Image (cartoon, rainbow, N blue to C red):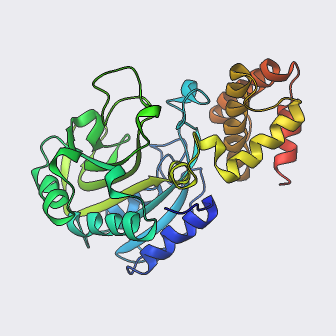
Amino acid sequence: MEYLGLNEIRERFLSFFESKEHVRLESAPLVPREDASLLLINSGMAPLKKYFLGVETPPGKRVTTCQKCIRTPDIERVGKTARHGTFFEMLGNFSFGDYFKEDATKWAWEFILDDLKIPAERLWVSIYQDDDDAFEIWNKNRGVPAERIVRLGKEDNFWEIGSGPCGPCSEIYYDRGEEYGCDNPNCAVGCDCDRYVEFWNLVFTQFNSDGAGTYTPLEHPNIDTGMGLERLACIMQGVGNLFEVDTVQNIMKHIAKIAGVEYKKNEKTDVSLRVITDHIRSTVFMVGDGVVPMCCAVCCAAPRATECCWASSGRSCLKSATLSLTKI
């Protein structure tokens, strides 16, 4: 497994799926277009709902993207864990009624093992508890040992956010090793510690949800996958958390310089630096896509980052850092 920069990983993924006859699309803006169900784009699939629902014709039956995303449900965990952030990029490959579970798992495994050369013995797969078809494909066709395939419930392995296309999913995990585990003797895939990192989610889209508990079968099943670019970069670069990835680390170093502090000298200060780094990334990208400060997402992120600036340096450096980051 070789070291790969974040930008190189992004290009490798998109080029790989272009070689599988996928059309590469640019990232959509963070502000949804003609979709009142979302305040901000929160997944790679969100801008493509119109294609999954048949409202518009996609540019091809196979599509690949790297989508800018914002999610805030775990905002209080940002900076405290190795994997949480409000802004991230989501790599994805999508099928609109073309291929399904067999090809989705085949190409995912090919990219991971042959292109990225991640050791198979470090990988685990989770499936929806009732998805026997997925178990057979992973076990017999992909060669994943049965003991490395974990069945989880709806909360973990049935993908839906609000209304729109949804369905059971398979998640691919990377085992970082016992040193990243917790004190729980039953620590395993699905544990909330940082040992088993879920980095690719393959959603087998079979239903349309109205957001109120009604699931209507789609006429043609689809594929919607999402892989966190920063999480994958952590694996490929062998770093402890997403804030130490090459491109993100450059931002944090700049913030530390402005604040007059050093990273990895004080845990409380480190948390503050990570929070500021994440929230400035989110704020800059939201403003770049037309969100103004009166909007609640910016109002949620910016004051929290300012509070951490005061905590880490005794003064507010958010304005200075934001202005500086727009130039780098």
Q: Nearer the viewer, residue 54 or 65?
A: 65
264 relative to 108 in the view: left or right = right
108 relative to 205 in the view: left or right = right
Please tell me in which quadrant of the rendered image residue 312 appears. top right
Please tell me in which quadrant of the rendered image residue 134 appears. bottom left
> Which residue is drawn at the image coordinates 55% and 64% (left, top)?
9
Q: Nearer the viewer, residue 303 or 165?
A: 303
> Which residue is drawn at the image coordinates 87% and 37% (left, top)?
257
> Which residue is drawn at the image coordinates 37% and 74% (left, top)?
62
301 relative to 55 in the view: left or right = right
The total of numbered circles placed on residues is: 0
Q: Give how far across and how far down residue 288 sits, in percent.
A: 73, 52
Q: Is residue 163 above or below residue 10?
A: above
Q: Nearer the viewer, residue 226 or 177?
A: 177
> Which residue is drawn at the image coordinates 15% and 49% (left, top)?
146
Q: Give how far across and how far down residue 231 sits, in percent.
A: 51, 48
69 relative to 110 in the view: left or right = right
Q: Nearer the viewer, residue 300 or 270?
A: 270
Of the 4 image quadrants, the one containing the C terminus is bottom right
On the question of residue 161 being in view, the answer is: yes
Q: Give how far across and how far down residue 68 sits, in percent.
A: 57, 53
Q: Give how far across and how far down residue 49 sits, in percent.
A: 39, 57
Q: Is residue 193 above or below residue 225?
A: above
